[in-house]
Image: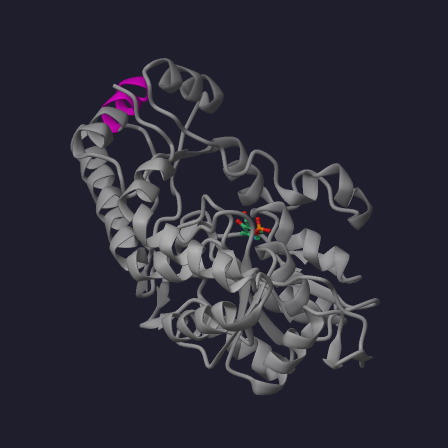
């Protein structure tokens, strides 16, 4: 049996006519950048995330960069984030001219260990923002993060690239900090037919700044208050995303029930696989990824899964403080032991909405056999 990691062809086939009609509408309008399609999608996305404003841009990486610039992180500033995440989280901080300061993650939630935030803020008084990541589709523990940020008058920027529709205590990702950043990379739960990204905020002034920054800092025709970027969402992507947004909850619910089946099977089979644990606070996890830990031989296990038809991925094999490009931050191996351990042991299993029950059973039993 073949268990693919993702099946975008199946997803597209189910909505093909609707998506093609939306693309045709844009082609007929000949308006390809920003415009009405983008404005409408921004409104729908803001509403979906429970935020007042949404500002589309060219990618999730750009959403982070625009958010950091809008929240005034720049040269001489530092931004607190985690080393166990996709590269762009810290890459955007460096591109904004600021220094990424890392604290470790929690072993069970894969998200920022909030107990380490205060000590880091004391050590680096130039930290201007906290950048928690809602990794794999589960929210970071946002209440204490917001409380600390409020007391220090620093910003909170959510890296919600993997978490559209995820909830923390009944509130959606993207409405939990000053700015939320989303990615519409095709493999995301809400994926475009190319690159795309979005910032959400409840703050009108920040929304205005984000809108200006995505068009070279322009606030009126040929008038530039600040230096910005060329990072616009194009109309074809917005039209596709608006169609897909209608199905997102249904797809995310399928992911969550697939994850629940895996958890039941691992429990029944008494394997040594370490399944993801629920957060100790109320959340809606949207399972962008279903990530287990292998107590031993992760790479060998992955190879043997592949030979039995089960695809898997490693997110992420190297913590960011171990990346050569961040060597000048001065961190060394051992500084973030949980992130390093996760990088050696994590394995993401297929959890996409188009899996059948028998495919999940095959993946779970094969893994259990490899790790009794
Ligand atoms: C946690 C995280 N942050 C940022 C990004 C960047 O998004 P994009 O690939 O759209 O630039 C991603 C995308 O993979 C991500 O997973």
In the image, residue 186 above or below residue 36: above
Residue 243 vertical position relative to residue 186 in the rendered view, above or below: below
Looking at the image, which residue is at 30% across and 26% down? 3
Give above or below for 81 relative to 194.
Answer: below
Relative height, residue 102 to residue 354 (above, below): below
The image quarter in which residue 119 lies: bottom right
Q: Nearer the viewer, residue 79 or 225?
A: 225
Q: Position of residue 174 (x, y in %)?
A: 47, 69
Quick check: is 226 in the magenta stretch? no
Residues shaded magenta:
364-372
Quadrant of image for the C terminus? top left
Residue 316 occupies quadrant = top right
Q: Quadrant of the N terminus?
A: top left
Residue 73 horizontal/vertical position (percent): 73, 70
User: Residue placed at 64% from the left, 75% from the top?
Assistant: 211
Colouring rule applied to residues: one colour
Residue 262: x %, y % from top left: 24, 37
Which one is nearer the viewer's eye here, 242 or 69?
Answer: 242
The residue sitting at 26% across, 50% down in the picture is 256
Q: Quadrant of residue 346?
A: top left
Q: Is residue 170 visible?
A: yes
């Amino acid at each position: 049996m073949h268990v693919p990691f993702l099946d975008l062809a199946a997803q597209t086939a189910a909505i093909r006519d609707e998506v093609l009609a939306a693309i045709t509408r844009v082609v007929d309008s000949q308006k390809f950048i920003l415009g009405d399609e983008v404005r409408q999608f921004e409104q729908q996305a803001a509403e979906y995330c429970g935020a007042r404003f949404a500002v589309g841009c060219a990618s999730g990486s750009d959403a982070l960069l625009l958010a950091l610039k809008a929240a005034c992180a720049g040269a001489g500033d530092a931004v607190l984030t985690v080393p166990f995440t996709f590269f762009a989280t810290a890459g955007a901080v460096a591109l904004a001219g600021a220094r990424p300061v890392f604290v470790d993650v929690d072993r069970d939630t894969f998200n920022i260990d909030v107990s380490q935030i205060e000590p880091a803020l004391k050590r680096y008084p130039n930290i201007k923002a906290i950048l928690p990541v809602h990794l794999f589709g589960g929210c970071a523990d946002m209440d204490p993060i917001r409380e600390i940020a409020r007391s220090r008058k620093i910003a909170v920027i959510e890296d919600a690239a993997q978490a559209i529709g995820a909830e923390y205590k009944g509130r959606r990702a993207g409405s939990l900090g000053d700015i939320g950043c989303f990615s519409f990379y095709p493999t995301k739960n809400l994926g475009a037919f190319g690159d795309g990204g979005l910032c959400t905020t409840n703050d009108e002034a920040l929304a205005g700044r984000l809108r200006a920054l995505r068009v070279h800092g322009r606030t009126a025709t040929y008038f530039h208050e600040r230096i910005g970027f060329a990072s616009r969402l194009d109309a074809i992507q917005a039209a596709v995303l608006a169609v897909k947004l209608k199905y997102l909850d249904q797809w995310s619910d399928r992911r969550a029930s697939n994850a629940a089946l895996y958890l039941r099977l691992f429990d029944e089979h008494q394997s040594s696989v370490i399944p993801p644990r629920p957060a100790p606070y109320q959340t809606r996890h949207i399972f962008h990824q279903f990530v287990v830990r292998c107590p031993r031989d992760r790479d060998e296990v992955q190879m043997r899964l592949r030979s039995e038809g089960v695809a898997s991925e490693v997110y992420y094999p190297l913590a960011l403080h171990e990346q050569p490009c961040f060597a000048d931050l001065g961190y060394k191996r051992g500084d973030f032991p949980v992130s390093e351990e996760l990088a050696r042991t994590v394995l993401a299993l297929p959890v996409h909405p188009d899996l059948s029950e028998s495919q999940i059973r095959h993946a779970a039993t094969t893994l259990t056999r490899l790790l009794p």
